[in-house]
Image (spheres, rainbow, N blue to C red):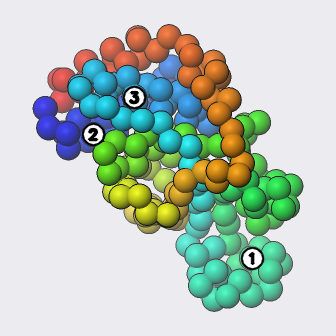
C-alpha cells in the first residue's frame, strides 16, 4: 500500500474507531498513540509532536484582517470566534474569554499530533468544533509541514485552523505518562488496520 493510500485510509477509519471506543471530548493523546501504532504496523515511522492549535470562524479571520476594531467588544459584536490552546494567550487572559470562547474541556492545554516525514496529521481535529459559531473542522487534518513556523488550512464547511510548534519556554511532557498514552490500544489498532486493509 502506498503512503498516500495509508494516510487516506487512516484519516477515514481512525476517527470513527476512536469515537466508538473513547470518551467524548478532547482525546488527542489517545488519537496520536493509536495513529503511531497504526502507521508502525504499515512500516511508517511517525513521531508525536506537541503543538499550539488555533481554530477560528470566518468572522474572526475578517475581524483580524480589519485590524481587530473595537477589541473584545468589537469581536463579540461581529460574532468572531477563536478556540486556542496557546499558553501565552491563556496565561494573559485566564481562559481568554471572550476572545477564545469556552475553554477546551480538558485540564491539559497541549495538543498532540503526528509528524510523518513532511506531514502534520491531527487525528483529533474534531475537538475544536464549535458549529454554532461556524467552526466545523473535519474529524482529522493532514497538512504539508516542512518545518515552517506555522501551517494552516481552511475548512470546507466553515472556519480555519493554524498549527505551530509548542513554545519551548512552556515545557509540558506529562502526556507521556497519561492513561491515554500508556493504555493498551491493540484492539483499536487491529480494528483500524483491518479496515484499512479492506479499503
Q: Are marks 1 and 3 in contact (CB under 8 Å)?
A: no
Counting from the top left corner in percent of width and height, residue 101 is at 74, 58
Counting from the top left corner in percent of width and height, residue 54 is at 60, 59
Of badges 2 and 3, the one in the foreground is: 3
Of badges 2 and 1, the one in the foreground is: 2
Q: Quadrant of the C terminus?
A: top left
Counting the numbered discs, the total is: 3
> Which sits in the foreground, 13 or 121?
121
Q: Which mark is residue 7?
A: 2
Counting from the top left corner in percent of width and height, residue 11 is at 34, 39
What secondary structure is marked by label 3?
Answer: helix
Query: Where is 96 relative to 8, above or below?
Result: below
Instruction: Work out whether residue 44 can be spotted.
Output: yes
Question: Mark 1 vs mark 3: which is more N-terminal?
Answer: 3
Counting from the top left corner in percent of width and height, residue 13 is at 34, 31
Of badges 1 and 3, the one in the foreground is: 3
Which residue is denoted by mark 3 in the rendering? 36
Residue positioned 53% across, 27% down in the render: 30
The reply, left or right, for residue 58 in relation to residue 132 is left
What secondary structure is marked by label 2?
Answer: helix
Which residue is denoted by mark 1 in the rendering? 75
Query: Where is 192 relative to 57, above or below?
Result: above
Q: CA distance from mark 2 to mark 1?
A: 37 Å
Amino acid at each position: 500500500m502506498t503512503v498516500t493510500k495509508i494516510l487516506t485510509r487512516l484519516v477515514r477509519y481512525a476517527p470513527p474507531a476512536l469515537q466508538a471506543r473513547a470518551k467524548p471530548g478532547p482525546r488527542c493523546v489517545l488519537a496520536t498513540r493509536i495513529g503511531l501504532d497504526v502507521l508502525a504496523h504499515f512500516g511508517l515511522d511517525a513521531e508525536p509532536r506537541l503543538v499550539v492549535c488555533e481554530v477560528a470562524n470566518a468572522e474572526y479571520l475578517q475581524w483580524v484582517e480589519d485590524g481587530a476594531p473595537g477589541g473584545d467588544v468589537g469581536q463579540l459584536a461581529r460574532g468572531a470566534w477563536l478556540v486556542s490552546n496557546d499558553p501565552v494567550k491563556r496565561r494573559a487572559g485566564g481562559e481568554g474569554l471572550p476572545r477564545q470562547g469556552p475553554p477546551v474541556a480538558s485540564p491539559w492545554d497541549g495538543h498532540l499530533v503526528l509528524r510523518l516525514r513532511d506531514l502534520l496529521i491531527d487525528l483529533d481535529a474534531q475537538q475544536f468544533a464549535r458549529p454554532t459559531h461556524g467552526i466545523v473542522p473535519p474529524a482529522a487534518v493532514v497538512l504539508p509541514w516542512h518545518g515552517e513556523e506555522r501551517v494552516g488550512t481552511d475548512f470546507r464547511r466553515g472556519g480555519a485552523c493554524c498549527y505551530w510548534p509548542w513554545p519551548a519556554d512552556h515545557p509540558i511532557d506529562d502526556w507521556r505518562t497519561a492513561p491515554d498514552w500508556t493504555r493498551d490500544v491493540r484492539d483499536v489498532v487491529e480494528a483500524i488496520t483491518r479496515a484499512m486493509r479492506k479499503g
